[in-house]
């Protein structure tokens, strides 16, 4: 008999995680709109237990909390009982805050990212260490996981991996724009850029970025010229500042 996972929320992140878990777990989804729950079921491609939020009992359940952070205070009073464990994907929402609104024996915070939809998320986890193994199994269904020792580290990881896809989108679009400016067709520039990211994604798994950079930068060559332009534009400093500002925002959201 499969163990049951109860999803509170039926958005894109919940669907991505459910897709990764549906072969191993019995899926139960709780939401505010029956039509959206039925759409979730259709997208998942299998029959699930569907429940409306108001009055739903989470007593003794394993819960994946997938609502928007701003909606926590609104949905919490509509639930009854005390969960066995809550796995939260709410950005910037501290364990202490979750426990204030939703009773649970244990809480684990997680921070997936956009790539969860293709099973390539980089998900950071922290919380009750007795659920570390289960947390890594559950969230491992959508990609890689890393357990960190503190919520501070998770908030920093949120700034890096959680928000990171947006930063890389900016870089990707700008590089393609640069190729178009020099005379390449837009469709060709986009294809080259996508190939670049695909290959680099594999290389970076096995080597330090500085070593990869040195390997491609020959003396007086094209890469050296372009790299110098990025340094002159303070791209490195901008990336460091992006992590700092995103982390500070995560801290502000947690209060």
Image: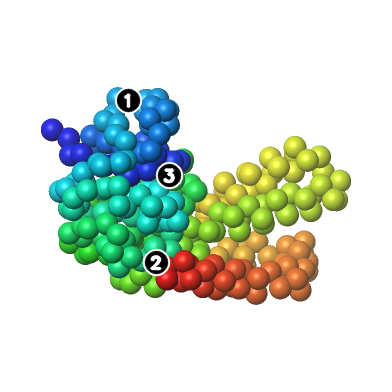
Q: Is residue 74 left or right of residue 58?
A: right
Callout 3 crowding tier (Cα within 10 Å): few <14, some 14–19, many ≥20: many
Regarding residue 254, the answer to whether it shows in the image is yes
Classify residue 91 by image quadrant. bottom left
**Residue sitting nearer the eye, 66 or 82:** 82
On the image, numbered disc 3 is attached to which residue? 13
Q: Name the secondary structure under disc 1.
A: loop
Residue 221, x across and y down, in percent:
77, 64
* Sequence-wise first label, 3 or 2: 3
On the image, numbered disc 2 is attached to which residue? 154
Q: Are marks 3 and 2 in contact (CB under 8 Å)?
A: no
On the image, numbered disc 1 is attached to which residue? 46
* Sequence-wise first label, 1 or 3: 3
Callout 1 crowding tier (Cα within 10 Å): few <14, some 14–19, many ≥20: few
Write the residue at 23% across / 37% down: 25
* Sequence-wise first label, 1 or 2: 1
Write the residue at 68% across / 65% down: 217
Real-space CA distance between mark 1 and mark 3, rounded to the nearest whole angstrom: 17 Å
Residue 14, x across and y down, in percent:
39, 42
Residue 29, x across and y down, in percent:
31, 37
Real-space CA distance between mark 3 and mark 2, rounded to the nearest whole angstrom: 18 Å
**Residue sitting nearer the eye, 115 or 72:** 72
Write the residue at 57% across / 46% down: 198
Real-space CA distance between mark 1 and mark 2, rounded to the nearest whole angstrom: 33 Å
**Residue sitting nearer the eye, 144 or 199:** 144
Residue 101, x across and y down, in percent:
30, 59
Q: Name the secondary structure under disc 2.
A: helix
Regarding residue 120, the answer to whether it shows in the image is no
Q: Is residue 183 left or right of residue 230?
A: right
Return the residue found at the far left: 1
């Amino acid at each position: 008999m499969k163990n049951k996972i109860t999803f509170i929320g039926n958005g894109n992140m919940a669907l991505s995680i459910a897709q990764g878990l549906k072969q191993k777990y019995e899926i139960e989804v709780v939401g505010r709109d029956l039509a959206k729950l039925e759409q979730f079921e259709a997208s998942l491609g299998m029959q699930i237990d569907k429940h409306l939020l108001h009055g739903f009992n989470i007593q003794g359940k394993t819960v994946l909390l997938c609502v928007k952070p701003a909606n926590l205070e609104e949905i919490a009073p509509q639930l009854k009982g005390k969960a066995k464990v809550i796995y939260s994907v709410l950005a910037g929402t501290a364990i202490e805050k979750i426990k204030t609104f939703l009773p649970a024996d244990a809480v684990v915070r997680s921070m997936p990212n956009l790539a969860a939809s293709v099973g390539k998320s980089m998900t950071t986890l922290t919380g009750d260490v007795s659920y570390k193994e289960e947390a890594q199994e559950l969230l491992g269904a959508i990609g890689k996981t890393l357990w960190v020792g503190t919520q501070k580290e998770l908030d920093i990881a949120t700034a890096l991996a959680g928000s990171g896809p947006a930063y890389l989108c900016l870089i990707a679009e700008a590089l393609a724009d640069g190729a178009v400016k020099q005379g390449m067709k837009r469709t060709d520039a986009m294809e080259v850029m996508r190939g670049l990211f695909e290959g680099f994604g594999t290389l970076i798994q096995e080597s330090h970025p500085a070593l990869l950079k040195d390997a491609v930068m020959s003396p007086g060559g094209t890469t050296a010229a372009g790299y110098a332009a990025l340094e002159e534009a303070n791209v490195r400093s901008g990336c460091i500042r992006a992590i700092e500002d995103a982390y500070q925002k995560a801290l502000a959201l947690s209060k």
